[in-house]
Image: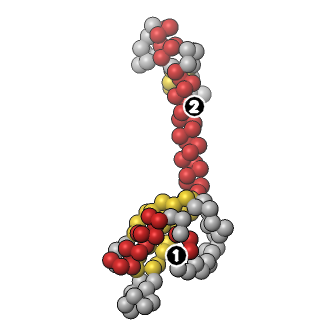
Amino acid sequence: MKPRKTHLRNFQWSVGIPKLRELLENVLSESTDLYSFEIDIEFPVWPPHNVLNARPLHNDGKKNARILLAIVDVTEHKELEHKMISSELRYRRLFKQPRWILILDALNGEITDINPFLINMLGYSKEEC
């Protein structure tokens, strides 16, 4: 992926995010670093989910103060995380239903999981199944 060059001045992109503006001002005033600040923003040239890291560059006083800002697109990661959580919730709900549910290993035919309703009905423990 080719890096995008975007020139934003005077905190244009942080106007709607007061906490980010405060953190970046601290990077300059206190010469501190900013690590893994998650930001969800709708801005034409950026993906919606990003993680920001920042550090001050050598400044000659406040006159030409600059920040080195690294922006990592975590949109795909966030989407996968959401899908995984949704899948886990569906799986848990399914197993709590009063139905007979059992998952078999297709290669050897062994039971890999069984819901409590079927365990109670069969009268065996999960380990015995």
**Residue 67 picture quarter:** bottom left
**Residue 15 place in picture, x, y as percent:** 53, 69
* Three-letter residue code for mark 2: Arg
Residue 11: which disc?
1
What residue lies at 56% left-to-right and 71% top-to-bottom? 13
What residue lies at 34% left-to-right and 74% top-to-bottom? 32
Per the image, label 2 sits on a secondary structure element best described as helix
Work out whether 127 lies above or below 28. above
**Residue 65 place in picture, x, y as percent:** 43, 86
Foreground disc of the pair 2, 1: 1
What residue lies at 57% left-to-right and 36% top-to-bottom? 87
Is residue 19 found left or right of 12 in the rendered image?
left
> Can I make out residue 124 in this image?
yes
Is residue 2 found left or right of 55 in the rendered image?
right
Give the residue number, with chain letter if any, for mark 2.
90
**Residue 90 picture quarter:** top right
